[in-house]
Image (cartoon, rainbow, N blue to C red):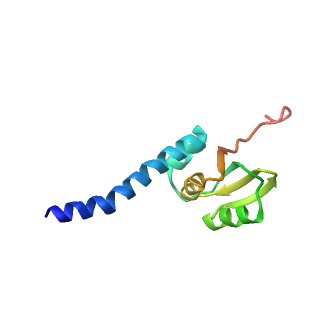
């Protein structure tokens, strides 16, 4: 019985620590509005901005695409993108991501 407990701790503890780390990473890198949208879950795509710690190379584009994120425009280390909540949370865990921010609609002065 004691051996089973040790085995459980060896396998379960890293999973629990990684899960906790993931929540901390999302909280630190993702702005409040986008965090709220991620917490809602769902399958609807969300538009957002990405800031990376280096220019977005072909290699980074492939990594981002493999997560399921759709890149819309790129400028150096910044990008606009779309993705589902789970995909955005996975993107936030990547070491090259500095910040993720929800896109906001802005009314022009002549719009009512």
In the shown orientation, is residue 54 left or right of residue 87?
right
At horizontal 70% and vertical 67% (from top left) the residue drawn is: 62
Identify the image quadrant of the C terminus. top right
Q: Position of residue 86 (x, y in %)?
A: 53, 57
Residue 44 horizontal side relative to residue 39, left or right: right
Question: In this picture, is 111 found above or below 45?
Answer: above
Q: Residue at x 72, y 65 (%)?
A: 59
- In this rendered view, identify the residue nearer to me: 94 or 82: 94
- Residue 58, image quadrant: bottom right
In which quadrant will I find the N terminus?
bottom left
Of residues 104 and 61, which is closer to you in this image? Answer: 61
Nearest to the observer: residue 109 or residue 67: 67
Please name whichever residue, 40 or 59, is drawn nearer the observer in this view of the structure. 59
In this rendering, the answer to whether 69 lies above or below 50 is below
Q: Residue furthest left?
A: 1
Furthest residue toward top: 109
Q: As displayed, is residue 106 above or below residue 54?
A: above
- Tell me what residue is drawn at x 83 percent, y 36 percent: 108
Residue 105, image x, y percentages = 73, 41
């Amino acid at each position: 019985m004691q051996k089973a407990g040790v085995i459980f701790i060896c396998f379960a503890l890293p999973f629990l620590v990684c899960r906790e780390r993931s929540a901390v990473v999302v909280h630190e890198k993702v702005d409040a509005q986008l965090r709220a949208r991620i917490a809602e879950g769902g399958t609807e795509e969300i538009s957002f901005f990405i800031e990376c710690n280096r220019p977005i190379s072909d290699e980074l584009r492939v990594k981002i695409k493999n997560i399921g994120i759709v890149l819309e425009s790129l400028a150096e280390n910044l990008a606009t993108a779309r993705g589902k909540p789970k995909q955005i949370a996975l993107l936030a865990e990547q070491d090259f991501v500095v910040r993720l921010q929800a896109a906001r609609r802005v009314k022009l002065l002549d719009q009512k």
